[in-house]
Amino acid sequence: MNIIVIGSGFGGLSAAIRLQAQGHNVTIIEKRDKPGGRAYVYEQEGFVFDGGPTIITAPWLIDELFALGGKKTADYVSIIPIDPFYNVRFEDGSVFRYNGNHDEIVRQIRAFNPDDEQGYYRFMEKAKQVFKTGFELIDKPFLSMTDMVKVLPDLIRLQAQRSVFGLVQKYISDERLQQVFSFHPLLVGGNPFQTTSIYALIHVLEKQWGVWFAMGGTGALVQGLTQLFLDMGGTLRLSTEVARISMDNVSLKTDGVVLKNGEKIDADIVVSNGDVASTYLHLIPQKYRKKNTDSHITNMRYSMSLFVLYFGTKKRYDNMAHHEILMGPRYKGLITDIFSNKVLSEDFSLYLHRPTATDPSLAPDGCDSWYVLSPVPHLGGDTDWKKAAKPYRDAIVSYLEKRYMPDLEKNIVTELYIDPLHFRDTLNSHLGSAFSVEPILTQSAWWRPHNQSEDIPNLYFVGAGTHPGAGLPGVISSAKIAADLIAEHYS
């Protein structure tokens, strides 16, 4: 069959590879001039900046994709483990070196608060239970309430209604350690105080299988998967934007897509790796959407957005690790401002990425390549980013310079930034959300937008906004779900 995949993010590439391996004729349609979606790569004055995800977990999911083409991951890209996974730094000057070494984790917990050692053991046992149940669902579809009923007893047993922070707080009392073991939902667009405790499985996933990095940057992994898809006979069309998903008025199925230039491309099946909300709201007329109406889509809750500053320095800051989590003076208050109040706070917590700590080739000799990421409200608030972006950039650089990176401003030789307007206008994300639908319990599994549209039976969804959710393991698994459903329905 002829299948069109809209978007070449990790979800779209993974789906395209799986469908091509099934024997279909697959064409990826990509709006931008390079593949990758949110994992776009910027190159500026000899510096290479990964635009999007930089944390690779569950590497076997990547190995599976290359195996579908009869290849090994190493044939296309080198993926290596890193240590530490993150340095978590606090305003009081303390640093938690977060990695997979159990003895080292426990030693640091004792140093922070000896009374929390036993609580950590109990937390880990609970997290392992959550992982065993939760990760088994990561590549299973939830298309009917029956699918949901089957897992409800497990969710009730695991107290999935409890938040990640609530689970951690039950066992750990030190406020800094509570942050160390509860910040992970922010990496997939979630509020640690509201995201279901099922996401505590991330700690087990990282601890047992590590955090990895693609030499050459995440973009090298995108290039490897793209080349694999092309080597398998797939077709990629760049700088090509879809204007609408074409519908057959008799069958009420899609029969392809219409491009911005007016060209029609016929297809038996369409897979959207675009933002779920934008796909429904802007590519499909509402008359074809009895379930996914405009009001249904707009009434869902969406993740926060991001401000990301990419910059190159003419010196190296070897005091900073590959991944740094810089906790600000407030935790719950800041997160409440971002998710609930939707106001841009004067303080911030930051994720600082220094890939040249592992791969110096991403910058000129003696230099460092960076990005610093700050979670911010999506465009449902009243921040005017055309006015706010530059002062916000200046505040972040000043903070880094005072606390961690002396003389930073004068050592920056090149920079660019993206903000919520970029997520809305360039990445077509509803409200400029960086991770699509917020991962709360009532927007998870069956309650999350389905991998197969309820309205259009030959339209499928992959990526952050559908089941199972954001993050590389999630979006890659969403592609497996969609490809398996297509194989089942059209065998």
Image (cartoon, rainbow, N blue to C red):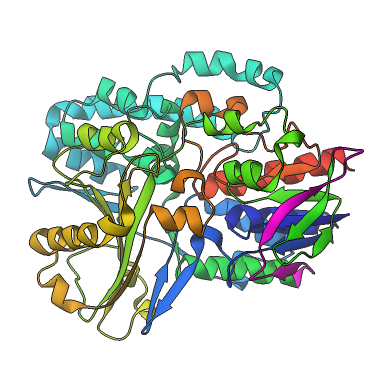
Measured from the top left, where is residue 127 in percent x and y? 40, 29
Q: How many discs mark residues in the rendered view?
A: 0
Q: What stretch is highlighted in magenta?
A: 231-252
Query: Which picture quadrant has residue 262?
Result: bottom right
Quarter holding the N terminus is bottom right
Q: 361 and 300: which one is in front?
A: 300
Is residue 240 magenta-colored? Answer: yes
In the rendered view, would you say 38 is above or below 145?
A: below
Measured from the top left, where is residue 293 in percent x and y? 65, 31
Query: Which picture quadrant has residue 193?
Result: top left
Q: Residue at x 77, y 55 (%)?
A: 257
Asked whether, in this view, residue 304 is left or right of residue 131, the answer is left
In the rendered view, would you say 97 is above or below 239?
A: above
Query: Which picture quadrant has residue 160?
Result: top left
In the rendered view, would you say 410 is above or below 25?
A: below
Q: Which residue is drawn at 72% across and 41% down?
A: 285
Q: Which residue lies furthest to the right in this view?
A: 250
Q: 306 and 400: which one is in front?
A: 306
Measured from the top left, where is residue 450 in percent x and y? 66, 34
Q: 121 and 445: which one is in front?
A: 445
Q: Is residue 212 visible?
A: yes
Q: Residue at x 16, y 61 (%)?
A: 400
Asked whether, in this view, residue 204 is left or right of residue 109, the answer is right
Q: Is residue 323 visible?
A: no
Asked whether, in this view, residue 451 is left or right of residue 388, the answer is right
Measured from the top left, where is residue 473 in percent x and y? 54, 47
Is residue 394 magenta-colored? Answer: no
